[in-house]
Amino acid sequence: MKQIQAFFYGTLLMTSCTQKPSRTTVNSCELHGDTVIINSQSALAKKIHIDTISRQLLRQQMSVAGVVKVIPNKFAEVAPTFSGRVLSAYLKLGMKVTPATPLFSMSSQDFITAQKAFFQAKEQLLLAEKRLARQRNLVANGVGVQRELEEAQMNYDVEKKEFESARLSIRLYKANPDELVLGQPLIIYAPITGEIVENKVVVGQLIKNDGASVASVAELSKVWVAGHVKEKDMGAIRQLSHSQITIAALPGKIIRGTIFHINELIEESSRSVEVLMECKNDDHALKPGMYVNVNFENTPQPTILISPKSLLQQSNTSFVFRQVAAGRYVRQQVETNGVLGNKVVVKSGLSENDTVISDGAYYLLDAR
């Protein structure tokens, strides 16, 4: 009886396997080196979306902190090189000045000494000129001696040089020798065109020839902004051409700057490179010493942008799957350069009209 039951169950099992419908296995993809082949009949093929790359004009930007600086040749300190006491002051903060604008007057012994030397040299020259004229007259009338004429001429030449030297000394004090009056005070003039930004002049104070400056003049219609670009961003510095300056205290105000110098030395403390920009500052919105935000930008360049879903990473490398034929994709290593909006900027590795997987590329990471 047991043998009959065993035979019955065995026959039933064989019949069941025989009647089970057959299934055909479809491989989704195949991996051959760096190339993945996707079966067009597989479900995976429906999950893959591709996109053709085109170049777009992109203006590269970089934001850093900056400091406003005075342009060196548009700033001057007033520090007289002569000792004396201030007699009167004409300057005041904010006053517009030129090199012809008097700032203050002072009684200077050095200037008095120069005046005395000038008038003495002038008097000696007049005497030498009279002697020379007399000797010329005597020789012309046949009663003079040629040797005495030559001595008079030599003496005149020496006195003339002394006078010119004394005259030059007066001009060093910015005084007019032709209008000079013995004992007149020394007038200190503005060194450059600009406005008074610092004033320490006090009537009666004693100024020494080796003392600190007593006033400062600056021309602030143009200023420098020094931005500091980090060492890691040095590769993009040479491509930069313009900048936009924004001030936290003045929301919405944008000031254009032109890059004119990139320092060749790296600041060791901050590991950054100083980039100097020249900015118009007619309204004096930029104050020397002020901290500002600098947005560097370059001229628009043709740039390749891809979807973030296209980009994959593995073993510290970035790559995409580039289509080489229908259903055939090759692993293509790329170098990126940041993100712009919802796109990734590709620096190298792809060309215009390349076709890449824009969505679903991560399904191919497990291809065998």
Image (cartoon, helix red, strand yellow):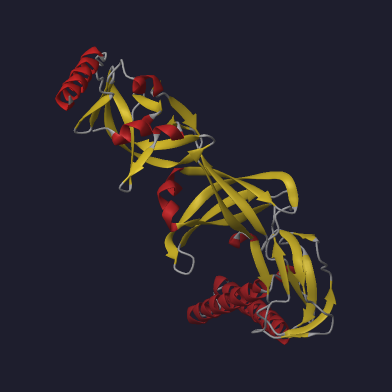
Front-lying residue, 9 or 57? 9
Q: Quadrant of residue 41?
A: top left
Position of 341 with respect to 107 (left or right) is left
Q: Quadrant of residue 225?
A: bottom right
> Is residue 210 rendered to the left or right of residue 20?
right
The front one of 318 and 90 is 318
Quarter holding residue 125? bottom right
In what quadrant of the picture does the N terminus appear?
top left
Q: Is residue 328 above or below residue 222?
A: above
x and y, in percent, of residue 274 in the image: 50, 59
The residue that appears at 24% across and 17% down in the rendered structure is 16
Rendered position, 235 above or below 140:
above
Residue 34 point in image, percent of width and height? 22, 33
Instruction: Tally the marks.
Output: 0
Quarter in which the C terminus is drawn: top left
Question: In percent of the image, x 50 and y 36: which residue is there?
Answer: 299
Residue 113 vertical placement versus 236 (above, below): below
Q: Residue most toward the front? A: 1
Residue 128: x and y in percent read: 61, 79
Please give the name of the residue rendered at 28% of the width and 24% of the height, measured from the top-left corner.
Answer: 28
Q: Nearer the viewer, residue 2 or 253?
A: 2
- x and y, in percent, of residue 5 in the image: 20, 23
> Can residue 6 be seen?
yes
Q: Is residue 50 visible?
A: no
Please tell me which residue lies in front, 197 or 271. 271
Horizontally, residue 94 falls left or right of residue 302, namely right
**49 left or right of 91 in image:** left
